[in-house]
Each structure stands twice: as C-alpha cells, then as structure tokens.
Image: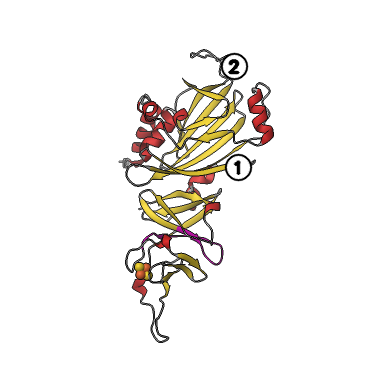
Amino acid sequence: MTTGSWWAAALAESVDASRPLAVVCNGEALVLFRDASGAACALEDRCPHRRVPLALGKVTPKGLQCGYHGWTFDGKTGACTAIPNLSADERVPPRYGARSYRVAEASGFIHVWLGDGEPDDARLPGSLYHPQGEEHTGASIVNVAAHEYLDAMLDGPDCLVSFDGVRITDFFLGDARTGDGWLTVDRGAVWKTRMLPPAFVTDHPLIVRTSVSLAGGAALVGLLDADETPLVTVFVASSANRRGTTSLCWRGFRHDARVASAPLRWQIARATGRAPFTVREQIDGAALAALLVAPSRDLAAARTAIRAPIASIA
Ligand code: FES
C-alpha cells in the first residue's frame, strides 16, 4: 500500500551544483543539490557519521561532501563514496550511507517523494501548472501551521494572496467541487477603482478560483474574467516546517489575455512586467482568526472520503 506522496519542496532554479540547499518539507529536514550530471538530488540533512547537517558541506564531482570530516555521499543512492584518509586497500562500508529520496523535476519545482510505497509520477503536485508567460517566483516560511494555511486558501484567500488592483469578495460563485484529486471553489472579485464598489457586490467582473490538492501541500489560485478566461495563475506549494510554521514556494504568471475593463494600474503593470500577484509572506493573524470556516469543511470531508475503505460488494 502506498502511503507516501510527492511534495514540491523547492523551486528548480534554487537548486544548483554550487551549494547545497537546506529545506524542511512536510516536517522532514532535507538537503537538495545537483550532482555532476545536473540531476536534482535529495538527502536527509543529517550526516550518518556525526549527525551534522549535510547542508553545511559542499557539492563535489563525487557527491555531497560533509563539512565536518569530509565524507562524501552520492546524491541518488546516498551511498558514501569517499572518506578522507582511507588507505587504498580499505573500502567504505555500505552501512555508511545517508538516506536518499526519490526526486522528480517538473513545472519548475523539485518534487520529493516522502513516505512509503512506489511513487506515482503521474501525481506530481505541479502537474496542473503550465506557465505560458513571464514567471514571478518566490519562497518563504510563514508563521502559520501548514493545514491552517491550506484551509485559509479556501476560506479567505485574500489573507494569503493578492492580485494587483483586485479586491476579492466573500461572495461564493457556486458550491465547492471536487475532481482529479482537487477541491475547487470560486469567489467573485472586482477591480479596485478610485470609486470603491460597495461592500455588497452582485456583479462580479472577475473570478478568483482556488483549488487545493486533497493529497495536501499544493494550491492553485487563478484570476479569471467573467467569461472564465484566465488572467493570472499562481501555484503555491506548501508543507509543514518546524514549530508550527509552513514552507512555501510559488510560481505564477500573467496570461496573454487583454482585459478591456481593467483599470489603468493593471494596464501599466502589464506593460512594465510588474508581478500581477503577491503571495503574502507576513500574514495578518487577526484576519486569519476571523475567517469563517466554510469550504475548508468540504476539504476535510473530501479527504475523509478518499481515505475511507471501499465497502465490499456482497
Ligand atoms: S560528521 Fe559528517 S563526516 Fe563526520
């Protein structure tokens, strides 16, 4: 039985062969780097010799070298490939390996398989994200627990993400729906203008569509016009870090669609290439606490349903 999952642990461009990158993904301390072939690798961020973080070491042609006593570990297998001062007739014992993880690079993310079972490469979280324009990316650690972060993405996405010149309303456009392992909810949104629209708006020229993976960890947030033409797409990968915090990395882009009704601010931002969205790195705790629990209830129910055993047919 497979109990593991793929997690998008880092932006592909933040992992290179010049230095190791320490990340915490779903509570596990990992070190990411690229080996001599350019392949992304993930090891447990703990040297099997004296438990020093391997991220303090350096990347060499033979693998990742621990910064303390210089043992070197192969990125794919975790096998210890070199120990300084070993005589020519001594071999490195096989048990001296570091724990290694399966890695898949897709959609600009480094995915790591955490848990048991055989990885299903068709279920990579980033597989729904297909950039079609200049991307804007980032990574951060936010002061909110990981499950609360995803719940808030459904119950009040404006606490976590904003679109340039757009006000996300509390008005749901239909019920939450599930499909292909995601729960999706639509909200009405309006352009911010100098003449602020009333708090209660019935005509929404924009839609904010939020999809959260039932497997956890990923959210896709889209800004669409009233005809459901996509304007901006943002993919946010999240997972538990330490002490109730959440690791984030994200990529997003503006679609090529022109919007006649958009305010001048939007048109200027488009012309200058300014990022059309912000993933908030400082989250307003009071606003988060005030959110009504709504679609996140559906998320909890959908997750329970997929975990429930299938009744046998008599
Ligand atoms: S602690 Fe890593 S080689 Fe000794």
Give coordinates of residue 7: x percent, y percent.
44, 49
Marks 1/2: CA–CA distance: 29 Å
Magenta residues (range): 32-46
Mark nearest the camera among 1 and 2 is 2
The residue lying toward the viewer, choosing from 166 and 188, is 166
Q: What amino acid is at disc 2?
A: Arg
Q: What amino acid is at disc 1?
A: Glu
The picture quadrant where one finds residue 101 is bottom left
Give coordinates of residue 8: x percent, y percent.
47, 48
Is disc 2 surrounded by few (<14), some (14 to 19) or many (20+) residues within 10 Å?
A: few
The picture quadrant where one finds residue 303 is top left
Q: Is residue 93 above or below residue 51?
A: below
Q: Which residue is mark 2?
A: 194
Q: Which residue is mark 1?
A: 135
Is disc 1 surrounded by few (<14), some (14 to 19) or many (20+) residues within 10 Å?
A: some
Q: Is residue 81 above or below residue 30?
A: below
Q: Residue sitting at 44 percent across and 50 percent down?
A: 6
Looking at the rendered structure, the secondary structure element under dot 2 is loop
Instruction: Give the left or right position of residue 182, taking residue 262 as reference.
Output: left
The residue lying toward the viewer, choosing from 120 and 256, is 256
Looking at the rendered structure, the secondary structure element under dot 1 is strand
Give coordinates of residue 43: x percent, y percent.
42, 61
Q: Is mark 1 within 8 Å of ligand 1?
A: no
Instruction: Give the left or right position of residue 199, taking residue 135 as reference.
Output: left
Tell me if residue 40 is in the magenta stretch: yes
- Counting residues from the start of the chain, the first of labels 1 and 2 encountered is 1
The residue lying toward the viewer, choosing from 224 and 59, is 59
Q: Is residue 266 visible?
A: yes
Quarter of the rendering occupied by the C terminus:
top left
Q: Is residue 164 above or below residue 145?
A: above
Tell me if residue 138 is in the magenta stretch: no
Q: Residue sitting at 52 percent across and 70 percent down?
A: 61
